[in-house]
Structure formats: C-alpha cells, structure tokens
Amino acid sequence: MKFDRTQELADIAAILGCDYVGEPDYPVKGMNEIHVVDPGDIVFVDHPKYYEKALASKASVILINKEVECPRGKALLISERPFDDFNRLADHFYNLNPVHQLKSEKANIHPSAHIEPNVLIDNEVEIGKNCLIQSNVVIRGKVSIGDNVILQSGVVLGGSAFYYKKKSTGYDALRSTGSIIIEDNVEIGPNTTIDRGVSGQTFIGKGTKIDNQVQIGHDTKIGKHCLIAAQAGIAGCVNVKDEVTIWGQVGIASGLTIGEKATLLACSGISKSVESNATYFGTPAGNIRTKYRELASLAKLPDIMKNIKKISHGK
C-alpha cells in the first residue's frame, strides 16, 4: 500500500509512539508485506528467525521488536508489537468505509457495462467496456476490472485476506489494504471468491476462465489464458504462470509457483512448486509419469505380500 503522500520517519514514529533509528525526515512512501515491498516501504518483523530477511529486503524502513544494527541507507522503527503497529498504520492510512448503497456514485463504470440488479459496487471500483456483472455480485475495496469481463451471479471480489496471527487471546487478522486487478476477457463463474491483497495486488491475467466455487487467496497472481475448474482452492501468494490448467478440487498451498502450461489433474494436493509443460496429480502431487509407476507398483503389492508369506513359511 502506498501512502497518498510521502511521510517522514519521525511522523510515523509519533503515530505509533515508538522510538526510531534514522534521520527524522527520512522519507516513507508506503507499507507492504515482505514479498511485495519496494524501496520507500515499511515492512514488519517480529521473530528473530526472519530478522535477516526483513533487514536485507527492499524495504527502507523495518518495523522490528528489537533494536539491531541498522543497514546503511535504511531506518528502523522499534516496537514491542510490530504486528499490531503495522495494523495501526493500516487503519491510519487506509479506511475501507461501510457501503450504504448498492452502487457507489464514486465508482468508475464504463457506460457500455451491463450491471444487473442487486449488485454491490464499492467506492474504488473500476469497470471497463462491455462487461457483464450478474445479480448478487459483490465488489468491495479497490478493484480494477478490464474490458469484456463476465462476473456470474454470486461472485465476491475483494474479501479480506485469510491472514492471522495466533495470540494468547485468540487470532488477530492482518489488515487487508491491497487491491485486485482483473484484465480483459476474463470470465468468473458463480460463487467464486477472490480476496484482495494484504498490501499488494491479487491479479487475474487476460483471457483466464474460472469456474464455479473457486477460492483465490490474497496476493496470488494468475497468468494469462488459464483454465481453473470448479472448487479449486488457491492459497495466498501463489504465482500461476500463463496457460495453466487446474482441474476440479485441486488445492494449492501458499507461496508456490505453478509453471507455464502445467496441468494439475482433479483432486490433486499441490504442496511444492511445479515445473512448466508437465502434468501433475495425487496428494501430495507428483509428475504423472512417476505417479503412474507408483500406482502400478502398488497394484502388485498384494501378490508381493503373498509371496513373502510363502517364503517366510517355507512354502
């Protein structure tokens, strides 16, 4: 998330009531998660395991729970609770206002777009030419929709990210201040849900077709001309390259990369990144050639066990 205008380090520290390391007028341009940070951004870290990664990231300001040596050219914000303070900054600089009417007057909707009754369109939504938005669609937060896009009934765009930190009092959510970009000629089936980014973008590439009841998590990027069948579940921060085919009830764990033109067969559980131009299936998923050999071997197992018993009994 980028701020409306550049802030100064001392002003950010004053908002949080925390100490800082760096020049008071050090420029701060935004705040983001570590996988999408740019120079000028704040990133938070609250566990020693990730200190080095945060300090070496592109972020210019590290919101951290211990005073450490500050990398040259960067700044620190010293906080007892970096997660909570990151949320405080999100609340300060980003406000998702409640919606009081179905179609916001602030939304930017092309005159050629057809919006059916009972569609909720938030303030920061943009809808391009010749789009069809069917009844009972919900579009919340900052969502940009290209030309010739079809959203079938029940689609929800812009839900909060499923991102929680466990505490002694329960689970606290990391605020979702990101956006969604949907390029031209995308079709999305009924009751599919796409979450907005935590602080970056969830992205659906040109010409991609998505079936019914698909879940796409925060900050995930779907490439061009992909096919995603019903009930697939794609976690946050996944990178699906161009022309990937994902069949029904496939589950993909967070942070993985699905190579270009890969095919994921139905009911597969993807726990590791997969290569381009290959077919995978199974749980955990593997290359189809390997999986077929495994299944062929498994089919022989009863006979093998019989032979072992005969040998062990001297028959």
Image (spheres, rainbow, N blue to C red):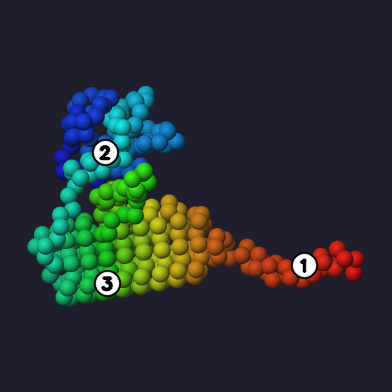
Q: Residues within 10 Å of mark 2 (few under 14, many from 20)?
A: some
Residue projecting furthest to the left: 105
Q: Amino acid at mark 2?
A: Asp
Residue at image mark 3: 154
Q: Residues within 10 Å of mark 3 (few under 14, many from 20)?
A: many
Q: Amino acid at mark 3?
A: Gly
Q: Amino acid at mark 1?
A: Met
| Residue in the foreground of this view, choosing between 44 and 170 | 170
Q: Is residue 207 visible?
A: no
Q: Is residue 126 visible?
A: yes
Residue projecting furthest to the right: 314
Q: Which mark is residue 281?
A: none
Q: Would you say 126 lies left or right of 84 here?
A: left
The x and y percentages for residue 130 are 20, 72
Secondary structure at badge 1 equals helix
Q: Would you say 253 lies left or right of 42 here?
A: right
Residue at the (40%, 60%) spot, across then down: 234
Q: Is residue 210 above or below residue 201?
A: below
Q: CA gap, disc 2 to disc 1? A: 60 Å
Q: CA gap, disc 3 to disc 1? A: 52 Å
Q: Would you say 30 lies left or right of 208 here?
A: left
Residue at the (36%, 37%) spot, across then down: 45
Secondary structure at badge 3 equals loop
Q: Would you say 89 lies left or right of 259 here?
A: left
Disc nearer the start of the sequence (3/1) = 3
Q: Which mark is residue 85?
A: 2
The x and y percentages for residue 291 are 61, 65
Snapshot quadrant of residue 303:
bottom right
Q: Which mark is residue 305?
A: 1
Disc nearer the start of the sequence (3/2) = 2
The x and y percentages for residue 46 are 37, 36
